[in-house]
Amino acid sequence: MRNSVLRRLFALAVAASVTPHALADADKVQELIKQGQYESALSEAEAGLADRPKDPELRFLKGLALTELGRQGLAIEVFQNLTADYPELPEPYNNLAVIYAQQKEFDKARSALEMAIRTHPAYATAHENLGDIYSRLASQAYSKALQLDSANTAAEAKLALVRQLITVTPAPNTPPATDPTEAGGAATTLAAPSSAAPAIASDAEQRVRQRVTAWAKAWASKDAEAYLSFYAANFQVPGGRSRSAWEAERRRRVGGKPGKISVDLEDVKVEMNGDTARVSFRQHYGSYNFDASANKTLELINDGGEWRIRREAVSG
């Protein structure tokens, strides 16, 4: 989601209360934020507010500095007070939504963004962020559907599509915009869709993705033999155990698990290197008595035209 920085439109909307001195103070605070000097920006904003406690621009920038410093509770208070005093301004609603989304309070985030759009229907950043919120709410709903019915292939396909949409990576250090013509009026990008992967995957990458999805589906279906068929003959068994001992254990854990289980893969990334593929993702496992999430990496090889797992590693 994108965090909106104060734009000149904000100042113009309350021009009657803004003086040249106030604008100079705001420019100084905004420059400090642009440089990543958030503590100094906060101090400067508070100094200006000591003389002009109702100044909307300084109050907004104070909230932005608090957000960057990780003081979400105080930032929420600043933005909420701004929405009460200046309900016609969309930016405080948008920035409230960013914080709520970070706290996984997606219903609150949705309500805040709807207010932002109601006050300013052409506010593109709020529309984009609202789309992100709807995607996250959909992901939660489809995940729940799969927990209740692991054989629901329609929900599985929808979940995979939604998670592709909301896959995010940290954005480069992008300075906040100070004018609507810069970066669409957006401020520091908190997260943006990854641009590292090509827009269209190669045939080999698509086959690898399909194999990993099928592997997870076989596991969720508790089809132990199908699950084991995804592992290459030279699979590197973890822990130094024999292949036969490892397979026996996996048959018990995959095929012998009572009740329904779910295996959801999130943020799947594929790196191709000839006949080898490295696939990393966040794995969410759920059963009637156990839920766990972990980062997992699979190394697959092209084994006679079929992609099979040669190595797997799990981290927290």
Image: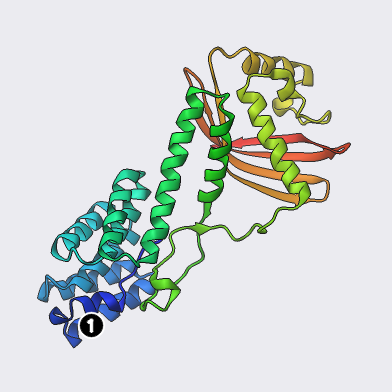
Q: Is residue 192 above or below residue 313?
A: below
Which is more toward the observer, 226 or 114?
A: 114
Residue 276 in the image: x percent, y percent? Answer: 79, 45
In the picture, which quadrant includes the N terminus? bottom left
Q: Is residue 298 left or right of residue 167?
A: right
Q: Which residue is mark 1?
A: 23
Residue 65 in the image: x percent, y percent? Answer: 30, 65
Q: Is residue 12 left or right of residue 251?
A: left
Image quadrant assignment for residue 311: top right
Q: Is residue 134 left or right of residue 261?
A: left
Q: Is residue 221 left or right of residue 110?
A: right
Outermost residue, bottom side:
20
Q: Is residue 47 above or below residue 194?
A: below
Which is more toward the observer, 285 or 139?
A: 139
- Whether residue 277 is visible: yes
Image quadrant assignment for residue 124: bottom left
Residue 218 in the image: x percent, y percent? Answer: 67, 25
Which is more toward the observer, 206 or 67?
A: 206
Residue type at tag 1: Leu
- Whether residue 1 is visible: no
Rendered residue at 11%/70% (across/down):
53
Q: How many residues crowd around disc 1 within 10 Å: few (fewer than 14), some, or many (20 or more)?
A: some
Rendered residue at 46%/70% (across/down):
174
Residue 62 in the image: x percent, y percent? Answer: 24, 66
Rendered residue at 69%/32% (across/down):
214
Scheme of colours in the image: rainbow
